[in-house]
């Protein structure tokens, strides 16, 4: 009993400290494949094979009740502590290469996600790419503004010279 209580407390802490959670089914994957998945997401998340009953209790303790229906069969959870999109991308890509991994759903910013929604997040571009695009758009806008102001200055100077 003490061991189970410690496991629930640890899982509760993981749920509370995570920015997002991805729930997967790993039936048919080898230990080597699971290790590869853990290594793929290590930078932004931790991946743990969990007992469904203890996970339900821990999730409910953390205020997450939306995973209860999906916690059946062999389950594993990715506890995201970094970039959710990068983790979702890595898990989706791994699932494409290893069809035995099934994304069941997750929770992001307190909102329950189904597998399709997780895949939509995974299809987003990375944070760095989005920031670069935003910076490029701002630079282009600033360049156009500078060119317009310069043209106005030249027009005024020509009008004064004439």
Image: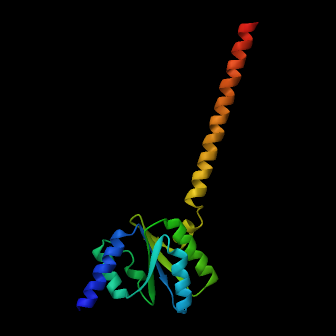
- Residue at image coords 48%, 70%: 44
Whether residue 66 sits left or right of residue 42 in the image: it is left
Residue 3, picture quadrant: bottom left
Residue at the (58%, 62%) spot, across then down = 124
Give the image quarter of residue 11.
bottom left
In front here: 22 or 69? Answer: 22
The C terminus, quarter of image: top right
Q: Quick check: 124 above or below 69?
A: above
Give coordinates of residue 47: x percent, y percent.
46, 80
Q: Nearer the viewer, residue 74 or 138?
A: 138
In the rendered image, which quarter is residue 144 located in?
Answer: top right
Q: Can residue 65 be seen in the rendering of this structure? A: no
- Residue 116 against residue 55 in the figure, above or below: above
In this rendering, position of residue 47 left or right of residue 139? left
Tell me which colouring the rendered structure shows.
rainbow
Residue 112: x %, y % from top left: 42, 70
Image position, residue 102 (x, y; %): 54, 83
Q: Position of residue 42 (x, y in %)?
A: 50, 75
Farthest-out residue, top: 162
């Amino acid at each position: 009993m003490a061991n189970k209580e410690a496991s629930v407390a640890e899982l509760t802490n993981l749920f509370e400290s995570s920015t997002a959670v991805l729930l997967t089914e790993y039936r048919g994957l080898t230990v080597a494949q699971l290790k590869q998945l853990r290594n793929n997401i290590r930078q932004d998340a931790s991946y743990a094979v969990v007992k469904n009953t203890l996970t339900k209790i821990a999730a409910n303790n953390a205020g997450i009740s939306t995973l209860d229906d999906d916690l059946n069969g062999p389950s594993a959870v990715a506890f995201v502590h970094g970039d959710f999109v990068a983790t979702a991308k890595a898990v989706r890509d791994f699932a494409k290469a290893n069809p035995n991994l099934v994304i069941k759903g997750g929770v992001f910013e307190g909102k329950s996600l189904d597998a399709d929604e997780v895949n939509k997040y995974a299809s987003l571009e990375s944070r760095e790419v989005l920031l670069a695009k935003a910076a490029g758009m701002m630079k282009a806008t600033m360049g156009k503004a500078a060119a317009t102001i310069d043209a106005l200055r030249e027009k005024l100077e020509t009008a004064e010279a004439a």
